[in-house]
Image (cartoon, rainbow, N blue to C red):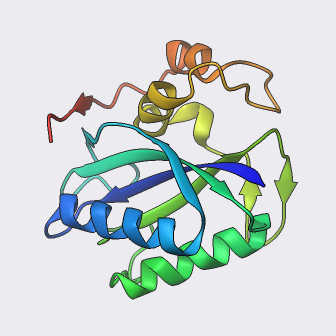
Amino acid sequence: MNTAYLLAGSNMGDRTAYLQQATKIIEEQCGSIIARSHIYETAAWGVLDQPSFYNQALAVQTPLQPEQLMQTLLDIEAAIGRQRVQKMGPRTIDLDVLLIDDLVWNTPLLIVPHPHLTERRFALTPLAEIAPALIHPIVNKTIAELLEECSDMLGVVKLDI
């Protein structure tokens, strides 16, 4: 059994409902959700001319191997209506694998740790809420330390929903 740390995000339609739907299907198809952060609202990263995102970190106990997990998350995205029209463009749901235990994995389908985790406040903030002492296996720093050092200045606001 592995512990996978995921980031769910949405910036189209009923963002909260999409996050809830994704969480339900993740629990059905991937394993038990053992921790979940609050939902955070953040400005879009990359393509700036789009609605803000709701993001939430999840810790999932999963029997799935890394690539099985990623393929299942891609299937969940498709089931929820994600269409890959524009790279980094608006989406109903975006499911990313941030970390899996202390695994370092690099294949065409999946790179773990997520290659941009250390530079994205919108991912580090919710992850630090549920796993501040988790150590990034490449840079050998805790998630809390990485958040403190993060140079990304995009606003990340905890929502009360």
The residue under the point 65% across, 78% down is 71
Q: Is residue 133 left or right of residue 125?
A: right
Q: Is residue 46 left or right of residue 44?
A: right
The residue under the point 14% across, 66% down is 14
Could you tell me residue 128's position as x and y percent? 50, 26
Q: Is residue 90 something one can see in this rendering?
A: no
Could you tell me residue 45's position as x and y percent? 38, 48
How many discs mark residues in the rendered view?
A: 0
Examine the image and state in which quarter residue 88 appears: bottom left
Examine the image and state in which quarter residue 19 appears: bottom left
Q: Is residue 157 something one can see in this rendering?
A: yes
Q: Is residue 70 above or below residue 100?
A: below
The residue under the point 37% across, 46% down is 56
Could you tell me residue 2's position as x and y percent? 76, 52
Q: Which quadrant does the N terminus fall into?
A: bottom right
Q: Is residue 77 above or below residue 63?
A: below
Could you tell me residue 54's position as x and y percent? 26, 50
Q: Which quadrant does the C terminus fall into?
A: top left
Q: Is residue 121 above or below residue 93?
A: above
Examine the image and state in which quarter residue 108 appears: bottom right
The residue under the point 48% across, 63% down is 95
